[in-house]
Image: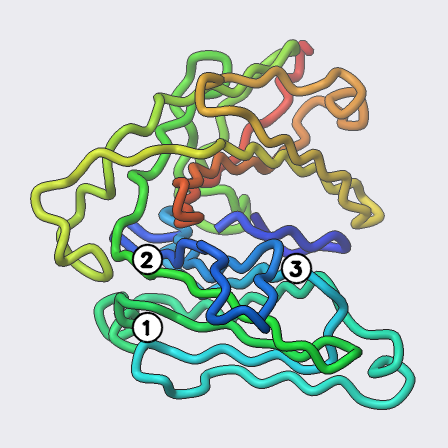
Amino acid sequence: MAEQNVKYLSMLALPFAAAAFTASPVLADDDEIPFDEAHLFFELNNTDGDLGIHALIDGEPWKRLSIEDPGERKMLAVNVRGRLKRQGLTEFFFESAEPTFDELSPRHFFRRFPQGTYEIEGITLDYQELESETQVTHVMPSPPQAYINGQPMGLQCDDELPGYDAPEVTSPVTITWDAVTMSHPDPLGGGAGVQPPVSVDINNYEVVVEYEDENEFASVLGVKLPPSETSMTVPEELIELAEPGDAFKFEVLAREKSYNQTATESCFELAENN
């Protein structure tokens, strides 16, 4: 989904495979405290062909945080200063730049982040040590195949570009998708080691629907659904914000239990006779 007044964790990546880091907090010794959450993962936007590395870390208030790769090379260091140091941080999220594949191929991107154990360490406000470990795997879910009121999702959502292809629909608007059960079918990129595709265990799906009015105010709806659900009806309150002919953008994201996630995005138009 495009970045508007509201930024979403995104939506995001590629027709290739990517990788994720599975967080399994463990104590390194009796004096260290595990983080409540310690996730490093890749997000693949299968539609736009871009990807990035993300992190979600949460736990006791801390003033220092670092991440080491499997070669024990530090890849992130955060030191909190001044008043914020006295307050401390708990939840910490970042997402990297997302270069397109012609700028940086998935194969080269994932060479930067090899499989193995990544270590996340921190220092609490009272100088206790925090530590968790995550395991990276080069397995990405297959991109979800989505439909709008039974119509296949469009391919081009920028009406200023050739090939614009937004299905026209009337309310109620229901987004459905095929259940994701296998890893990404493309043997290139980050999934080069997964051939043939393997089964994946989906943790949840996420659906994001966005409408931008003439004042460029973005109304965004994001819903997380269990793996047993493969459809969502867009609330009428959101549909009623638009005029006939207006377009909505949407994304369907499949998140594997490793936190590895693949998204597809598209759009639909409100029919004139709605």
Residue 81 point in image, percent of width and height = 80, 89
| Circle 1 SS class | loop
Q: Judge the density around disc 1: few (<14), some (14-19), many (≥20) Cα neighbours within 10 Å.
A: many
Q: Residue under label 2, please give it.
A: 19
The residue type indicated by label 3 comes to Asp
Q: Residues within 10 Å of mark 2 (few under 14, many from 20)?
A: many
Q: Which mark is residue 58?
A: 3
- Asked if residue 249 is positioned above or below residue 98 in the image, the reply reads above
> Residue at left 46%, top 67%?
98
Mark pair 3, 1: CA separation? 22 Å
- Please name the residue shown 38% across and 87% down the image: 73
User: Which residue is at a point 68% across and 60% down the rendered structure image?
Assistant: 59
Amino acid at circle 2:
Ala
Which residue is found at the position 79% from the left and 40% from the top?
213
Of residues 130 and 163, the one drawn nearer to the viewer in this rendering: 130
Choose top left, top right, bottom left or bottom right for residue 244. Answer: top right
Dot 3 alpha-carbon crowd within 10 angstroms: few under 14, some 14 to 19, many 20 or more: some
Query: Height in image: 241 above or below 101?
Result: above
Q: Are marks 2 and 1 in contact (CB under 8 Å)?
A: yes
Judged from this view, the residue extending furthest toward the left is: 196
> Quick one: SS at disc 2?
loop
Q: Please give the residue where the numbered disc 1 appears in the rendered image.
A: 113
